[in-house]
Image (cartoon, helix red, strand yellow):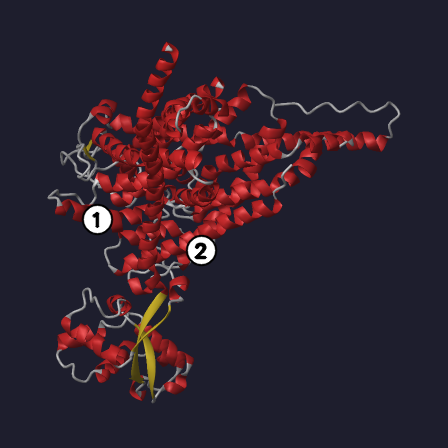
Amino acid sequence: MKNTDQQAQHLALINAGLKKRRRAETRFRIAGRFATMIALAFMLVMFSAIISRGSGAFQRTYIEIPVYFDRSHFGDQSTQVLQNADYSGLLKSALRSAFPHIKSRSDKRQLYRLVSNISAFELRRIVLDKPEVIGRSITVSLPASDEVDLAAKSEMTTFGRLSETQISLVQRLQSNHQIRRDFNYHFFTSGDSREPELAGIAAALAGSFFTIMVCVALSFFLGVMAAIYLEEFAARNKLTEFIEVNINNLAAVPSIVFGLLGLAVFLNFFHLPRSASLVGGMVLALMSLPTIIIAGRASLKAVPNSIREAALGIGASKVQTVFFHTLPLALPGIFTGTIIAMARAMGETAPLLMIGMVAFIVDIPTTILDPATSLPVQVYLWADSPERAFEQKTAAAIMVLLAFLVVMNLTAVLLRKKFEIRW
Amino acid sequence: MPRLPQQPALPEAAPANIVVQRKRHNIGEKLTLAVLFIASTIAIATTIGIVLSLVFESFRFFQMVSPVEFLFGLHWSPQTAIRADQVAASGSFGAIPLLVGTFLISLVAMAVATPIGLFSATYLAEYASPRFRNVVKPALEVLAGIPTVVYGFFAVIIVAPLLRQGGDMVGLSVSAESALAAGLVMGIMTIPFVSSLTDDAIVAVPLSLREGSLGLGATRSETIRHVILPAALPGISGGLLLAMSRVIGETMIVVMAAGLTANLTINPLEAVTTVTVQIVTLLTGDQEFESAKTLAAFALGLWLFVLTLALNLLAQKLVKKYREKY
């Protein structure tokens, strides 16, 4: 009797608590879901902010006006004269005749500022290409200045720093359909510039390319060799243990410390050229080595022992076994690890700042010894610029950088899917 | 140097060409092994290179500025000369404001990353359906692959202005380069790091513990809170220490979003500067190599290296201790 009484009491106690416990369970589950959603939301906000700001930079605004290539500008039309003719005068007179109502000096100056500084070079290019235009009037597309560019991309809703006069001129051009937008191939073919509308990422891309090439050439072979030694040959002793501890700790050293190492050793001690992609690649190689070694060891470890034993059994030496049997089977995994390490190196900025790859680079570097910058450093430089138009360029450069990283990571995933052998 | 396994001796009557071949071969093998060994020591060489260059340059710095001033000084302004007739040192080099700034931003970052990372990892490991997990987990890992300069840009153009506007609405003045903005974005960057390390620690808890708890009638959340998380605690705290060391050494977000001038405060709404920001500002732009200003960057680098190394070793020790338990 007493026993069942107690049981009933216990049951009542449990049931009383059950509601509360179930509520706690639901709360916990919701909190978990909420945290996951917050993390994803952050990512979405970041990507949409960058895409909405940057996509404009892939287009370029042109102003189409008729230009009369007056014979009086070109004298005897020899190449010499054509090269050095007064194209900016030509441009100014074309702009003036397009807007005959502009009379005052300051208004004229504002009119000239609607087009980019390179418009005069554009006219020169046309004349040098087709001298027969001289004496005729043709419609020319001139690159617009950065403020006009931004106004056109906002569909004439915001005008930034454009003056009243300029706004009325731009609106007139717009209603006459003289403002045109086109794919901005310039962004991919030109180097940095002080003028936002002329700045491009070609120099930064070339710098990134050279840096990564140096980095992969050094880190891949050194990393694979170290992985082979540690996984296949090294005896378990104090030295090997020390090496392993070192590798694990190097993987966690802040990247800026590698930059300090590069500055002190490569630049100040060995006097290698400052700002060169050679040094950048070397620093990034030291940084990526631990990742590659760890990935290499993991994929060597995954090769089953039966392969090694079979090779040894038919008379191969240990070195032959490793290089002709174990390594080829482990290579897909090593490649995957290397590509992931290179993707990380490609997005790295801080160590490159230390070794002076943070220069204003207009000319596209052609060797690994030329002063260069890299894509993430270019992002940093542009993000620091005060001009409003650079914000768009920065976001666009980030989009290009992310596109490269996505391609690299996808390659790694596909490589793993296609070639990795599951034993 | 390790030895190669001994090959069986050739019989007495082996043809001469085989004997020669094998001799050559053995030399080749030894050479290969030597090259492999040298490649594996490059990690040691790098560590030695880092330590030597940092210690050497810091030593020269401490000949100009006393270590006591550097470690305990409350004033950091390497740009301005105190006296006009000063030759070697220009300005003052008390690193305390930088350390306080670094910790302030790191704390904000950890305050963001720890709860979100822990909760999302627990949810993904214990509750989420396999389909949800297979989509969300790689998506979170994408966050980890984004270059930090992108986060820096995000902090400058979105987060900082938003915080400023939010502050204006409730009547707080938030600096344009507030520690809050930099720390918040750094926290977002650290979420996948925390969540993947937590995930590892949770998965490593033996199934028997979980089943025992569920069998006694505990709910899932009770099992997680009272059994799994305590069992995974050493692994999780190791992971958090690693995350902390990463956050302290992070450079680009703070260079872009935090302040440049030292400011001794613990108010996250004000602009503070960090160790990494100062290293970058001291070493970019015009520099003469012999000045205290340039060498100070190496002393800061040494400080950073020692701190992150200590955190990493501690974290490894914690994780290792945990592994031995089961």
Residue A298 against residue B167 in the figure, above or below? above
Quadrant assignment, res B148: top left
Q: Position of residue A43 (x, y in %)?
A: 35, 47
> Crowding near pointer 1: few (<14 within 10 Å), some, many (20+)?
some
Task: Give whichever of A253, A23 is nearer the camera.
Answer: A23
> Which residue corresponds to the image point at 60% horizontal and 25% vertical from the top-left?
A234
Looking at the image, can residue B303 be seen? no
Looking at the image, can residue B319 be seen? yes
Q: How many marks?
A: 2
Q: Give the farthest residue toward the front.
A: A1
Indicate the amino acid at tag 2.
Ala
- SS at mark 1 in the image: helix
Task: Give the mark toward the camera: 2 or 1.
Answer: 1
Q: Give the farthest residue toward the top.
A: A2
- SS at mark 2 in the image: helix
Q: Which residue is mark 1?
A: B162
Q: Position of residue A91 (x, y in %)?
A: 27, 78
- Image quadrant where one finds the N terminus of chain B: top right
Q: CA distance from mark 2 to mark 1?
A: 36 Å
User: Can you tell which mark lies on residue A410?
Assistant: none
> Which residue corresponds to the image point at 15% horizontal and 74% vertical from the top-left?
A165
Residue A130 against residue A234 in the figure, above or below? below
Q: Which residue is mark 2?
A: A206
| Residues marked 2 and 1, same chain | no
Chain letter of disc 2 in the image: A
Q: Position of residue A169 (x, y in %)?
A: 20, 77
Q: Is residue A23 left or right of residue B174?
A: right
Indicate the amino acid at tag 1.
Leu
